[in-house]
Amino acid sequence: MDLALTILIDGAIYASWLFIVALGLTLIFGVLKILNIAHGSFYAIGAYAAASIVGLFAAEKFAPAFSLVALLLAAVAVAVIVGPLLERLLLRRFYGRDEVLLVLVTYALFLILEDVSKLIWGVNPYYVTEPYGLFGDVSLGSLFYVGYDLAIVAVALICGVGVWYGLNRTVLGKIVLAVIHNDEIAASMGINIGKVYLGAFTFGVFLAALGGAFTAPMISVQPGISVGVIIVSFAVVIIGGLGSIGGAAIGALIVGVARSTAVHIWPAAELFSIYLVMAAVLIFRPEGLFQRAVARRI
Amino acid sequence: MSRNLHSTLLYSAALVALLLAGLMLPQWLLFLLTMAASHGVVGLGLIVMMRGGVVSFGQGLVFAIGGYVAGLAATRYGVTDAVVLVLLGSAAAAIAGAIAGPLLARYRSIFFAMLTLALSMVLYGILVKSSAVGGSDGFNVPRPSLLGFSINETNSDYAFFALSSVIATVLTLLVTIYCRSSRGLLSLAIRDNELRVEYLGTSVRAAMAINFIIAAALGGAGGALTVISLGHIDPNFSYWTRSGEFVFMAILAGHASAPAVFLASLLLELVRSFSNKYFPDTWQLALGLFLLLIILFLPKGVGSLWAKPERLPRQAAEKAKQAAARNATEAAE
């Protein structure tokens, strides 16, 4: 019983930051039709930026509670700087090209950002310790958890509900949905598609960086974290169906629980349990769990 | 058939020239060419698939299977001949392809790419945890012999160069002939419009599965060649960044011409080793920039610089329509 509970809670914690990252990935895919390999790099840059800004706050002797503000600030800074720059200078040139070619473009971007972040932050690991102790320890029955880990679950819930509300209950959201469904018709209705693309991409980068910033206290921030994240979040959006928010949530939970089950029961399988689940889902539902099949065109 | 004969003569002449030139080349360039040929064979497989309109992001899967089978055959079962090792690696990968191919043949575009990627990462995960085959360190493979001749320190570079050149040339010729056959041309029709091909009475899935198996056999041969020349194998053979490089190679080559993939492969090896040498900390950056420039300025690949497009159905149809319209107006006047 304890084991089952542990697996579920560990899975939920893992799923929560994964959901934040995957939400950005699925949003970018929905609007721009780009499966963004560089998303993992945005996650890593967010984590690095968080390490820098938390360090800066600590040096200025701010109260530890401000380190949470620092995390948020890091994500915003990364999104505002990186998002528009890449969308305007690079991605804009490739819209409408073959999907696989676009994957390759973002793969090139991933290689570039990998080295750029090494140039900026070096190769030594960073540790962001300040925020981790803020929420103390929480006991659930006989199990003890670090409060921060559970706070991440709350952040993920806020992100999910926020994005859902924003898309389905606001005018701006309806505009974005119109572009997702058909950008040509949206354009002919007077929507400035370029702006929607820019906004969606920047917001996607923000979510990736937010995921990175909030996980920074739980991990050691070092080169190579981007690679692991990107493949796992790909698995999430593929399981859930590309471009679906509910799908990303369910996908993240499935991946999180699959991984924590493997960690507790058969540790050797940690790495490929995720891909096995993904392959299994794809074999039975090639479009993912939450996407309707598209009719073939003659 | 005369076109195939023509190609055979052309490829043989090119191979002889290459082997003669190899005698005069420095050691580092020979190694680079060996790697380019070995990896190019994997790219050749991708091109076979790309002609049908799908791209595998998991060619590392068959690359690693070919490599591991060749490596294990050499270390555990005492197979010493390099050509036999390549054949074994290729056959093993083809069997894996024959199992996965029919399953994967249902999928297209991004789903095909992601599913193949997932399979290759499953293999990576298994290999990293398998201490029997060296875990994440991999294992060393002894130098094999070549058709009864022993390979030693002094002649190994040229021997491996010759081996990979000959195999790469033969395989390219076979792929060229396959692409010209009616089954090979079917791939192009599938890329244009699957549904019509099915209405004409052919199984699209069977054609896709066959392409996948051919690509797997080629990938396995490439993996085995790489292991033989490197003398080492590790799970990174199956890692997704490796597969990404193969995709890049195939895009760089374009599917207009099969030999172009070796030029692309050589270009990639050159960029990689030079940026490794001159910008050791930022070679990924250099590689990424190179990739972006190619996609921006040569979207159809280097092969499009010299190869004539195989068929231009749409343009031909357009011309016919214009001609018909002209006739109609003339008749009206």
Image (cartoon, rainbow, N blue to C red):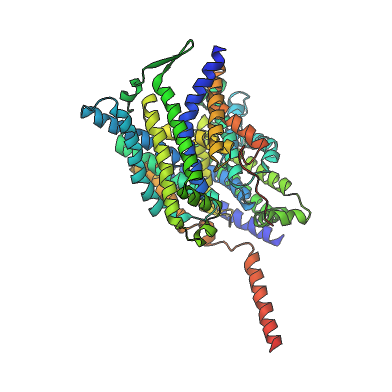
Q: Quarter-wise, where is residue A254 in the image?
A: top right
**Picture quarter with the C terminus of chain A:** bottom right
Outermost residue, bottom side: B333
User: How many numbered marks have been drawn onto this rendered protein structure?
Assistant: 0
**Picture quarter with the N terminus of chain A:** top right
Judge whether B223 appears above or below B72 on screen. below
> Residue B331: where, in percent of width, then height?
71, 86
User: Residue, x 68% and y 54% (percent of image)?
Assistant: B190
Q: Nearer the viewer, residue B26 or B326?
A: B326
Q: Quarter-wise, where is residue A159 in the image?
A: top left
In this rendering, position of residue B272 left or right of residue B123: left
Judge whether A60 appears above or below B111 on screen. above
Q: Does any portion of residue A255 appear in the rendered image?
A: yes
> Residue A68: where, in percent of width, then height?
33, 29
Q: Does any portion of residue B248 appear in the rendered image?
A: no
User: Residue, x 60% and y 40% (percent of image)?
Assistant: B219
Outermost residue, top side: A142
Judge whether B317 appears above or below B181 on screen. below
Q: Nearer the viewer, residue B86 or B281?
A: B281
Outermost residue, left side: A60
Q: Nearer the viewer, residue B12 or B312?
A: B312
> Residue A272: where, in percent of width, then height?
56, 28
> Residue B327: where, in percent of width, then height?
69, 82
User: Residue, x 61% and y 46% (percent of image)?
Assistant: B45
